[in-house]
Image: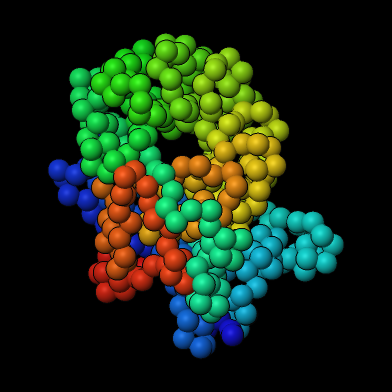
């Protein structure tokens, strides 16, 4: 089996005005990503996804170019089933042969950002092909699934203090969720305003619905500590990205100053970033985004780090269909996972791009049992929403 082609496209789905929301990223008017198609000489096709931003905040021409012009040419003729070997070669670039022969990485100088996301997009497609070639779902290749469905939390929560309780309660009613997440931080202007919204949410939901708060890394250390103190009686399941991802010591300071579990990782690249989060004692929940961190190969390594340090794994799944499906397979196979993210903001990249539907039932998402990632791409829809190069 040999790779015949690797092609990425910038896919852009506009979001209807009445479905848009506003956060610290601005108004989310579309959902964009780089969708990767890897085809083999024998006819098997795998699908992947790479991201460099949230929602409509990103421009994907550069990321697509890294995949198509930098990485793709060297993959033609390779066996796509050599997933981990290809990952290491792409990560170490021209020194990949040293990395494989000497047993340690020789990282390419451009090893973060676009390059890692590009590697991840290709990696997801290779896992899809590997599963299809063997006629088994990816979770089988990872060691088996621990459940046919996993609990999920509804991820959204942008309303003001007067409306946040009803918004989150609507999520509970819509999918039977027993856990919900809301956004806080710079979008509110000050920690006390965020705290007021969290307090209002908890009052409306009562004590039996788990509640998470996500600051998107927008608080300073001092602000995050003040916020955590003000919501100390709200029984938050976790406080997500309290400070910027670049400030790991600051995140550790917030964790040490509060009883709140800290979740982070959607902005991190590779197992090495997550190793540093753990070494700083900065987190309780690791949240790799499989379209950013380096794909499923790297996310599985991150999951192993979580298990080794008795931490929880909960992938960032605000994503399109390939990355979301890969996150389901990873979570189903990881001993460190307990709950899935399910976006309640408009997400056409998840719902319109594939034939299948990921529908919450009693607050849980079924783990696909179809071969590969278990998704069937609607290529006509993809072409209709591809941005011309």
Residue 167: x percent and y percent?
23, 31
The residue most toward the right is 102
Q: Nearer the viewer, residue 205 or 275?
A: 205
196, above or below 54, in the image: above
Residue in the image at 62% along x and 80% along y:
79
Residue 256 falls in which quadrant of the image? top right
Position of the C terminus by quadrant: bottom left
300, above or below 94, in the image: above
The colour scheme used here is rainbow
Q: How many marks?
A: 0
Residue in the image at 47% along x and 16% along y:
228
Residue 51: x percent and y percent?
45, 53
Q: In the image, is 107 to the left or to the right of 46? A: right
Residue in the image at 62% along x and 69% along y:
83
Q: Nearer the viewer, residue 146 or 47?
A: 146
Position of the N terminus by quadrant: bottom right
Residue 296: x percent and y percent?
56, 58
Q: Nearer the viewer, residue 147 or 167?
A: 147
Residue 337 falls in which quadrant of the image? top right
Residue in the image at 27% along x and 36% along y:
172
13, above or below 224, in the image: below
Q: Nearer the viewer, residue 274 or 217?
A: 274
Q: In the image, is 174 to the left or to the right of 110? A: left
* Residue 27 appears in the rendering: no
* Residue 179 appears in the rendering: yes
The residue most toward the left is 18
Residue 46: x percent and y percent?
47, 73
């Amino acid at each position: 089996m040999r790779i015949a082609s690797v092609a990425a496209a910038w896919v852009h789905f506009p979001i209807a005005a009445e479905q848009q929301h506003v956060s610290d990223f601005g108004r989310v008017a579309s959902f964009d990503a780089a969708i990767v198609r890897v085809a083999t000489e024998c006819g098997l096709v795998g699908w992947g996804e790479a991201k460099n931003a949230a929602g409509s905040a990103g421009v994907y021409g550069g990321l697509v170019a890294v995949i198509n012009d930098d990485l793709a040419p060297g993959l033609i003729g390779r066996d796509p089933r050599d997933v981990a070997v290809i990952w290491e070669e792409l990560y170490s670039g021209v020194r990949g042969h040293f990395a494989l022969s000497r047993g340690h990485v020789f990282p390419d100088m451009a090893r973060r950002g676009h390059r890692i996301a590009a590697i991840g997009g290709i990696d997801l497609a290779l896992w899809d092909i590997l599963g299809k070639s063997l006629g088994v779902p990816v979770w089988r290749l990872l060691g088996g699934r621990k459940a046919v469905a996993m609990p999920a939390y509804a991820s959204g929560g942008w309303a003001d203090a007067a409306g946040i309780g009803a918004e989150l309660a609507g999520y509970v009613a819509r999918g039977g969720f027993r856990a919900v997440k809301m956004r806080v931080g710079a979008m509110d202007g000050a920690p006390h305003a965020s705290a007021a919204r969290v307090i209002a949410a908890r009052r409306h939901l009562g004590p039996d619905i788990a509640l998470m708060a996500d600051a998107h890394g927008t608080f300073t250390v001092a602000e995050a500590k003040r916020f955590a103190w003000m919501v100390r009686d709200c029984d938050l399941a976790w406080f997500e990205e309290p400070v910027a991802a670049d400030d790991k010591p600051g995140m550790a300071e917030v964790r040490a100053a509060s009883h709140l579990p800290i979740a982070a990782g959607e902005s991190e690249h590779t197992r090495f970033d997550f190793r540093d989060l753990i070494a700083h004692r900065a987190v309780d929940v690791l949240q790799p985004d499989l379209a950013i961190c380096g794909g499923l190969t790297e996310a599985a390594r991150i999951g192993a780090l979580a298990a080794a340090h008795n931490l929880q794994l909960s992938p960032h799944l605000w994503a399109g269909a390939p990355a979301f499906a890969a996150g389901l397979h990873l979570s189903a196979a990881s001993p460190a996972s307990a709950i899935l993210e399910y976006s309640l903001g408009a997400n056409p990249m998840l719902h319109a791009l594939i034939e299948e539907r990921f529908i919450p039932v009693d607050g849980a998402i079924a783990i696909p049992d179809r071969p590969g990632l278990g998704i069937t791409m609607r290529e006509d829809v993809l072409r209709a929403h591809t941005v011309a190069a």
